[in-house]
Amino acid sequence: MAKLPSLKDLSREELEELYKSLYIDYLDLEEENEKLTFVAVDAVNQMKDSNTQLENNQRIIDELLKLVHKHIDQSFSLDDIPKFLN
């Protein structure tokens, strides 16, 4: 890897070119960071929605299990379900 020159050894024009190049790189990185932020926020929102749906499904299963225990079979458990699928 080549050694970079010291800033004090560069001419004004070279410094300006270096600045322009660095600024363009900065703008590109800023744009990429903004895109990644949107992706991250979207992923978090999807996880929240999934967790909410999971909680709702668990509540429904619990209510169904209570109904089965009350009206059909008090000893029924979720482990019994595969027996009924065969």
Image: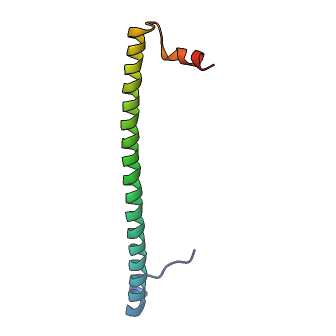
Q: Position of residue 38 (x, y in %)?
A: 38, 59
Residue 54 location in percent, x, y?
41, 33
Quadrant where the N terminus sits is bottom right
Residue 14 figure quarter: bottom left
Q: Residue at x 41, y 40 (%)?
A: 50
Q: Which one is in front, 19 or 31?
A: 31
List the single residue furthest toward the top: 74
Asked where in the image residue 39 lies, by quadrant, the reply is bottom left
Taking the image as shown, residue 82 lies to the left or right of residue 24, namely: right
- In the image, residue 72 sits, relative to residue 63, either above or below, namely above
On the rendered image, what quadrant is the C terminus found in?
top right
**Total residue callouts:** 0
> What is the basis of the colouring in this image?
rainbow
Q: Is residue 38 above or below residue 70?
A: below
At horizontal 54% and vertical 14% (from top left) the residue drawn is: 80
The spot of residue 15 in percent (x, y) is: 39, 87
| x 38%, y 88%: residue | 16
Question: Which of these two is toward me, 57 or 36?
Answer: 57
Residue name at image x 41 percent, y 50 percent: 43
Residue 7: quarter of image:
bottom left
Above-or-below relation of 11 to 80: below
Toward the right, the furthest residue is 86
